Image: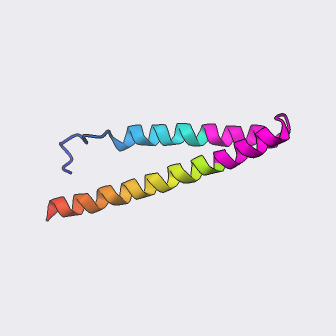
């Protein structure tokens, strides 16, 4: 996609803001759960889901960036 045309699905700047918000929330949830203040079963679920969210966000971010790079190369040909 050309630099002068805005992306139809949003800019990478806004995507990064959403990604960092979710990552920070997940890390805070994991830290709270591991501090021992949450009941054991809830903490175990929160840690599992927190790491799942972090993994999903990072994989999606990398895959999305790679996909956009591939499409940008196709557009320049």
Q: How many marks?
A: 0
Q: Is residue 11 left or right of residue 29?
A: left
Residue 54 among those drawn in magenta = no
Q: Position of residue 21 (x, y in %)?
A: 54, 36
Q: Is residue 20 left or right of residue 7?
A: right
| Residue visible at 44% across and 52% down in the picture | 61
Residue 14 versus residue 57: which sits nearer the camera? Answer: 57
Q: Is residue 33 left or right of residue 26?
A: right
| Residue visible at 64% across and 50% down in the picture | 51
Residue situated furthest top in the rendering: 37
Q: Position of residue 71 (x, y in %)?
A: 25, 59
Q: Quadrant of the C terminus?
A: bottom left
Q: Quadrant of residue 66?
A: bottom left
Residue situated furthest front in the rendering: 41
Residue 76 versus residue 46: which sits nearer the camera? Answer: 46
Q: Is residue 38 left or right of residue 17?
A: right
The correct choice, above or below, for 64 with respect to 5 in the image is below
Residue 35 among those drawn in magenta = yes
| Residue visible at 51% across and 49% down in the picture | 57
Residue situated furthest left in the rendering: 77
- The range drawn in magenta is 25-50
**What kind of secondary structure does the magenta stretch mostly adopt?**
helix
| Snapshot colouring | rainbow
| Residue visible at 58% across and 43% down in the picture | 23
Q: Quadrant of residue 67?
A: bottom left
Q: Position of residue 8 (x, y in %)?
A: 24, 40
Q: Position of residue 39 (x, y in %)?
A: 84, 36
């Amino acid at each position: 996609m050309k630099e002068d045309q805005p992306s139809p699905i949003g800019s990478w700047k806004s995507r990064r803001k959403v990604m960092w918000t979710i990552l920070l929330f997940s890390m805070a949830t994991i830290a709270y759960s591991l501090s021992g203040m949450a009941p054991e079963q809830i903490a175990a679920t929160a840690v599992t889901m927190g790491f799942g969210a972090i993994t999903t966000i990072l994989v999606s971010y990398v895959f999305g960036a790679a996909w956009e790079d591939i499409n940008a190369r196709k557009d320049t040909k």
